[in-house]
Amino acid sequence: MVKDCVTVWDSCLHVIRRNVNGQSFKTWFEPIRPIRLENNALTIQVPNKFFYEWLEEHYVSLLKMSIRKELGDKGRLEYQILSSSLRQLRNEEAVKNEVSTTAKGFGQSNSSNPGSIDTSSIKNPFVIPGIKKLKIESQLNPTYTFNTFIEGDCNRLARSAGHAVAKKPGGTAFNPLVIFGDVGLGKTHLAHAVGNEVLKIHDNKSVLYVSSEKFTGQIIDSIKNNAVNDFVNFYQMVDVLIVDDIQFLANKQKTQEIFFHIFNQLHQGGKQIILTSDRPPKDLDGMEERLISRFKWGLSADLQVPDFETRVAILESKMNREGVELPNSVVEFICYHIQNNIRELEGVLVSVIAQSSLNRREIDVDLAKEVVKNFVTQINKEITLEFIKNLVADHFDLPVEKLGGKTRKRQIVIARQLSMYLAKNLTDKSLKNIGEMFGGRDHSTVIYSIKTVQDLMETDLVFKDTVSELEKKIRLTLNEK
């Protein structure tokens, strides 16, 4: 049977879907379009160069495996990058009618060039009335930079996209860039970091950060003062607009109408828009469909709960900036119990230091427990190596003594390696202590076991689910005691 490009790519996607998580598949593989199949070479179309480079850096082995499975050892993959002119044409066609009718209601200049607006009489909504000052101040927090934003699996996509936007604001497919996630995961920090990086790289670019509440308040003031035209014209002069917490624009019809107009003018002018939200665009209730549609034009990147290692890195980075040191046992205790909110993580650190300083107490796990009790409802009981061994042995239906034996049967070896991995992640025991608990093995064997489990998790989603299930079971079982 002669294969066509669509059939081959669909088969490849079937393989890829089993080896990546749902969000990665949606972000990096759903936008790809198969173009042609010639001489064992499948050509796929990707949105931009950054997209291509990301695939080559992070998924080249997976792509190679899936292509060769379909086309044999001589199978090749070639890329076609979607031209920016074609992308712009599609977007302009989508909004042409709405822009032409909406612009009239806001006193839009007759010139099609936003840069031709007469700025001599435009008022700046960010300055005190009576002070004549049109210069755009960024409103950015200078301490929120990429250097202080720790990268991990939980935020790598959003952080990488932010870097790409900062290098070429308005010139990537990530326009708008929508950063979403739960409270306290770093959305505002990352948005400020992008803005600060733009100012660092492009001294001719203007950047403006505004919260949705501030934006709404400015609109109300402009309506009261019959100055809506000035308000809109001011925002059209911005090169990079960052709007924080757009979910608070919900059910504010006039605010959404004005923001829709500003969004269109900036986007058509090649300006960059960055938005943050506590949920993805599709879940923004009370928001006009035409706005949600535009939010989906670029990239929606979520910030997930950081894993244990990333939380430790975040806390250590904060400690370095503050010039303080905490014992490793205290750092790991805090990071184990504060899991879902980076602000709380840093808040615990501040509280521990304050308690130690004011009460002249040594910083130890007991002090950390007292502070953490103010942030979480329950302090988990200590996880022991013995408990982990028993749980893993029970899961694999093995005698627990086998995990410390010398047998090389695959099932027992996997169970032993998984036990060591869990012991390293969920306890504060040293590699030496862990090795001793599993038949007197040395620390290099423990390191090898941990690396083996990590590699298996990357290539086998079923195994990854097993690890997650055991971690969850350990915590639930301890909390029930």
Image (cartoon, rainbow, N blue to C red):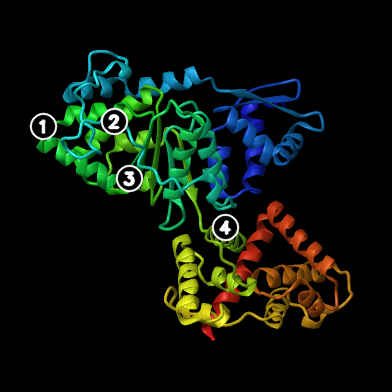
**Above or below: residue 202 compared with residue 25:** above
N-term mark: 4 or 1:
1
Residue 397's x, y, as percent?
73, 77
Where does label 3 land, which residue?
246
Residue 329's x, y, as percent?
63, 74
SS state under label 3: helix
Say which quadrant the C terminus sits in.
bottom right
Mark pair 2, 3: CA separation: 16 Å
The type of residue carrying mark 1 is: Asn
N-term mark: 1 or 2:
1
Where does label 4 land, which residue?
317
SS state under label 4: helix
Crowd band around label 2 with a 10 angstrom C-alpha radius: few (<14), some (14–19), many (20+): many
Between label 2 and label 3, give the one nearer the viewer. Answer: 2
Where does label 1 land, which residue?
226
N-term mark: 2 or 3:
2
Name the residue at the bottom extreme: 481
